[in-house]
Image (cartoon, rainbow, N blue to C red):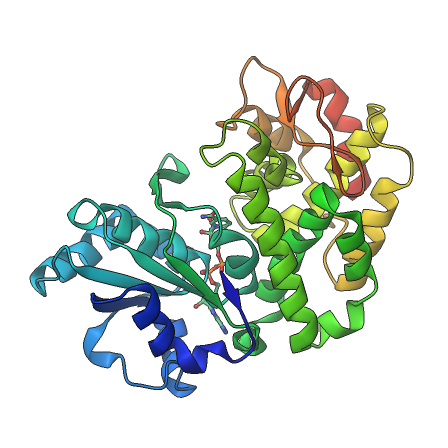
Amino acid sequence: VYVAPNALSALGEFVARHLPSRRVVMIADQQAYELARARRWGGFDWSSETLTFPAGEQSKTRESWAQLTDALLERRYGRDSGIVGLGGGVAGDLVGFVAATYLRGVPHVQVPTTLLAMVDASIGGKTGVNTAAGKNLVGAFHPPSAVLADPAALSTLPDRVYLGGLAEAVKHGLIADAEYFSWIEGHIEELGRRDLTALTHLVLRSVEIKAKVVGEDEREAGQRAILNAGHTVAHALERATDYQLPHGDAVALGLVVESRLAEQVGIAPAGVSQRVVALLDRLGLPTRYGGALDQDAVLEAMQGDKKNRDGAIHFALVSDIGRPHRERGWTVPLMSTRIAPALNVIR
Ligand SMILES: NC(=O)c1ccc[n+]([C@@H]2O[C@H](COP(=O)([O-])OP(=O)(O)OC[C@H]3O[C@@H](n4cnc5c(N)ncnc54)[C@H](O)[C@@H]3O)[C@@H](O)[C@H]2O)c1
Ligand SMILES: [Zn+2]
């Protein structure tokens, strides 16, 4: 994973180095591709070797996968081809899945252009698409050959999309590195104006943290669960609101509820959740739901989560800032009656 401001100006060389002697095709979301052309990322014209798909989550489907793989077959890309995926997490997951399955798998390079894709989606090798039954239910593990993250690309991101990436960075500090958490607390202003030096540090540190966790548990047998901090609640909030709540907002609220929960069940000392709330708030992320929250719907959505067995709901909790809690496993099973009080903090 390479992180450097303005690295996209040398995208062509980067791709040639990491996909040597391959016939390279770029697959990008339409919006990211327009940006790439306007800003001359890569230093040359990709138009003859580019496929695009409409930007947005609604493109993460088997239909898009079928269209893209058909287009590759039609253009006779062989086993000696390589794919560059350009865009946010949607491009990462969809293009990664195309690469994982095309002619039983060809190598790919990921070029994440959203903060979420840089700090989260491009690390760990998970690729896939959504189905009517739920998100990310069909996919494959197919790590990219290389990732190129250019923090300068983030200047054009809409605020809400940018903040969504920051929520995941706060999560990384919370689960793995108290010093990093403090560093974010001390760089609110720089992060607010998307200062390149601050962003480069943020992306690098988050990548290191996620890569370390994933590297120790590639197939999600245990430790990788800590990356799910805040997400048991976040996913339930998303489902209960029919995905009207942006993922980053849901993660922020999830971190608030789950750090409070850790205090309530006696795993974390008092004060942890207050520090989480203060940091998210100063970054501009929500710490209250605002509006009427249907608690039963949220609890029900948690019980339906694919990661939950035995009627209890499993949480990846922290025992302090920077310290994942581990007892018998990496998650703590709790019954819904214990969770309801913690949900009150985001009312
Ligand atoms: N594989 C994983 O481990 C993993 C982890 C986390 C999230 N994800 C997935 O990531 C997806 C969300 O990713 P996302 O938030 O990046 O969404 P996204 O890919 O839809 O990008 C958000 C929007 O930003 C636009 N955009 C991209 N780069 C831009 C730029 N530089 N300037 C301006 N606009 C730009 C895109 O065109 C899109 O409209 C979800 O599908 C989620 O499931 C995957
Ligand atoms: Zn997330």
- Which of these two is toward me, 18 or 326? 18
Residue 76 in the figure: left or right of residue 307:
left
Residue at 31%, 86% in the rendered image: 44
Q: Quadrant of residue 42?
A: bottom left
- Nearest to the observer: residue 160 or residue 230: 230
The quadrant of the rendering that contains the C terminus is top right
Using the rendered image of the protein, determine whether residue 194 is visible from the camera's viewpoint. no
Percent across and percent down for residue 306 are: 48, 27
Provide residue 200's location: percent of width, then percent of height: 63, 69
* Image quadrant in which you'd find residue 24: bottom left
Task: Please name the residue shown 56% across and 77% down the image.
Answer: 5
Q: Is residue 42 above or below residue 20?
A: below
Q: Is residue 201 visible?
A: yes
For the residue pair 147 and 55, the one nearer the viewer reads as 147
Q: Residue furthest top?
A: 310
Residue 154 image position (x, y, % from top left): 56, 73
Q: In the figure, residue 180 lies in which quadrant? A: bottom right
Which residue appears at 31% of the width and 58% of the height? 108
User: Left or right: 247 with respect to 75?
Assistant: right
Position in image of residue 121 (x %, y %): 49, 52
Q: Is residue 91 left or right of residue 3?
A: left
Number of marks:
0
The answer to whether residue 159 is left or right of residue 70 is: right
From this view, report whether residue 107 is shown above or below residue 19. Answer: above
